[in-house]
Image (spheres, rainbow, N blue to C red):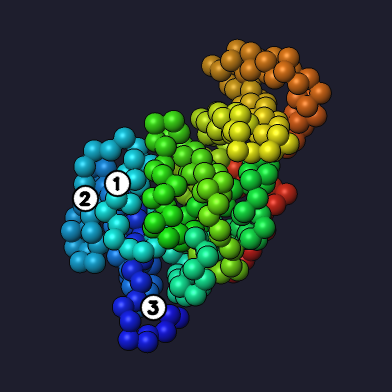
Amino acid sequence: MIEDHGTVPPLVSIVTPCLNGMPYIRDAIRSVERESSYVCLEHIVMDGLSTDNTLELLEQAPKVIYQSRRDRGLYDALNQAIKLARGQYVQWLNTDDELGKGFLSEAIELLERRTDLAFVVGDTLFVDAGGAPLCRWSYTTERIMDPRIRAQRFFFNINSMVIRSEVLRRVGEFDQDRYTLAADRDFELRLILSGAKGVAIPWVAYRFRRHDASLTASAGSSPNTLLETSRLFRHWSGANQLPVKTRRMFARAALELEIGLALKHLRSAATRREGFDRLKACLREAPLTTVMHMPRWFYQRYLSDKLPMGMDPMRVKRCSTA
């Protein structure tokens, strides 16, 4: 807990993009209220003209600052919420998730003590629709700071990060125009390459709820996300600020994702022709790599529907307690 020495405690802005957040948004708001007992918080909700009872709930939540207006998508709403944030620190909270108990207190104390740090990342606890634990995704400082790890499809859950607002704004907005599903991954790469220093702490920062209506819980294995992440990796494979070896790793990762996308298209009669065309393109570009990675993708296909965010099944830790 942050000690009170008679100074004004730092303000943390919790930013929430929202569209039809019922019924889980109640728990999201309560998790912020719970943490406000230990950290000075403001909760900003940017609503995209919800048609359920979300606006009525927000109206009755006295500690929530909200606006409701049309937006261009998730990241546009997030950018707008960040513009309203007054805090020295910012953390992102989705409407169907919850803040981890005690993480912010630990992280802000560390950031206040270590002025060289730009952000702190905690663990992500994945839960089912009822809140029962599924798995816990843990991080190390070395992995969150290494761009090469991203080329292996490892990204920390950006919701599990609290960041200095000045650094957040310096790195720049989430690129809604280029990436409608993977702008957080693009931001993460830009953050790491900006020279911002971060650390990981073994504390649950975020409870990520997996349910059928979730926009992101199974998005990692969706065709659109595979395609967008492949484009992201192709872009970074040409980034001059990266070493040549790392750029080659991104190019290889882009190819692997395109192989996975081709195999997904082959499963449906409606997209089978596109799948064959994509697979032939992969074989022309790198025949050996394509043949080597096809079995891995078949294996992942049968597990991916059961894993959050298309995680690599070899890296997931199952758990039975929060």
Picture layout, residue 254 above or below residue 303 = above
The residue positioned 33% from the left and 63% from the top of the image is 87
Q: Nearer the viewer, residue 144 or 20?
A: 144
Disc 2 is placed on an element classified as strand
Is there CB contact under 8 Å for labels 2 and 1?
Answer: yes
* Quarter of the view holding residue 59: bottom left
Q: Nearer the viewer, residue 116 or 279?
A: 116
The answer to whether residue 302 is visible is no
The residue positioned 61% from the left and 29% from the top of the image is 238
The residue positioned 60% from the left and 42% from the top of the image is 310
Residue 181 placement (x, y as % from top left)? 46, 37
**Structural distance between the alpha carbons of marks 2 and 1:** 10 Å
Residue identified by numbered label 1: 80
The numbered mark, 2 or 1, whose residue comes first in the sequence reads 2
Is there CB contact under 8 Å for labels 2 and 3?
Answer: no
The residue positioned 60% from the left and 38% from the top of the image is 241
Residue 173 placement (x, y as % from top left)? 39, 43
Residue 233 numbered tag: none
Is there CB contact under 8 Å for labels 1 and 3?
Answer: no
Q: Name the residue type under label 3.
A: Tyr
Residue 254 placement (x, y as % from top left)? 64, 30
State left or right for residue 211 relative to residue 276: left
Q: What quarter of the picture does the C terminus occupy?
A: bottom right
Disc 3 is placed on an element classified as loop
Residue 67 numbered tag: 2
Q: Name the residue type under label 2.
A: Gln
* Quarter of the view holding residue 4: bottom left
Residue identified by numbered label 3: 38
The answer to whether residue 48 is visible is yes
Q: Nearer the viewer, residue 122 or 271?
A: 122
State left or right for residue 269 relative to residue 32: right
